[in-house]
Image (cartoon, rainbow, N blue to C red):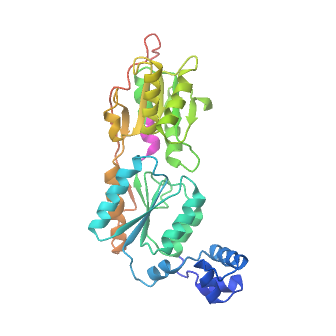
Amino acid sequence: MNRLAPKLSDVARVARVSVATASRALSSSPQVRDDTRQRVREAAAMLGYVVHGAARALAGQRTHTVGALIPTLDNAIFARSVNALQHSLAQASYALLLAVHEYDPGIELEQARRLVERGIDALVLVGTDHDPALFALLDKYQLPYVLTWALDPQRRHPCIGFDNREAALEIARHLLELGHRRFAMISGLTAHNDRARERIAGVREALRASHVELRAEDVIEQPYSFDSGQRAMSLLLARRPAPTAVICVNDVHAIGALLACQSLGVQVPRQVSVTGFDDMDISAYIGPGLSTMRVPKAEMGHAAAAYLLARLAGEQVRHTTELQLEWVLRGSTGAAPAGRRML
């Protein structure tokens, strides 16, 4: 680890200003000219300097706060894990600071800097897709962190998650066993989203092994919303021939897909089977109930808190914790339509 974190005097030297001017520039004082403020901020970014919160951490003064960077608050799947994380931290007298990056690595890095500035003692991240500068920042300030919702295949980073590819492969195999051969997928945007990419890859692997093709146009990427899932499903059902099985990378899109079937008079699962991933609470109550992969969201949040608290206490902890998922079979999946079974 690099224990020589940059100081304010280093920023001032690079920006060719006094330490007092550098301090005022970084605190957005109106006494500093815009061009000077920009020069100081560029110097701070180049050096990886962040302000007082990190300095307190380096001095060994705990703030008893943990940060969490999540992709979005629009998707309810993160709510339960964050709630469990906060609950476990609160029991240890730690507060949680939450920030959202909307799947943008640049925004995530900036939010991470802001959390470090506020003196967080540790950080929770989602997935494995992150700007290398983020890990460099955490290393520079010696902040414990943990990745959630996925596993790092290279084991470079501590993780508490599950194998997204293997879970999606299991879903596809279930549908293949039911006789389906015409598949389509609805996914969230895959850019900077390793979980979605791995789930698509798992489905492709399972289908390829059974000599079933999943073309590029058979995978529709949409933002996370019920409306997006409904629109994507309407497009798929308008194709001739239409797919008999639609694998959704998340429950939000899957519920939208079921709503599209309902509005178009398409019977589920007699005419088309639909699957999800996450097992949101509503997935058990819609009609038909959604067959989906259950993610232990609360367990993941509690485990992330336990990992970071142990690290902060100087204890030895397991580098990787793999959580087990559960395939929940409900009414949205069934045998391929009569006359199309090709087992």
Give the answer, above or below, for where 263 lies relative to 32: above
Q: Is residue 276 left or right of residue 214?
A: left
Q: Position of residue 33 (x, y in %)?
A: 70, 80
Majority secondary structure of magenta residues: helix
Q: Position of residue 276 (x, y in %)?
A: 42, 35
- Residue at figure coordinates x 66%, y 89% from the top left: 18
Give the answer, above or below, for where 328 lies relative to 145: above
Quadrant placement of the C terminus: top left
Give the answer, above or below, for where 76 lies relative to 62: above
Residue 322 visible here:
no
Q: Which residues are magenta?
A: 162-169
Viewer-proximal residue, 38 or 42? Answer: 38
Give the answer, above or below, for where 334 lies relative to 87: above
Q: Is residue 48 left or right of residue 128?
A: right
Q: Position of residue 80 (x, y in %)?
A: 35, 51
Residue 284 visible here:
yes
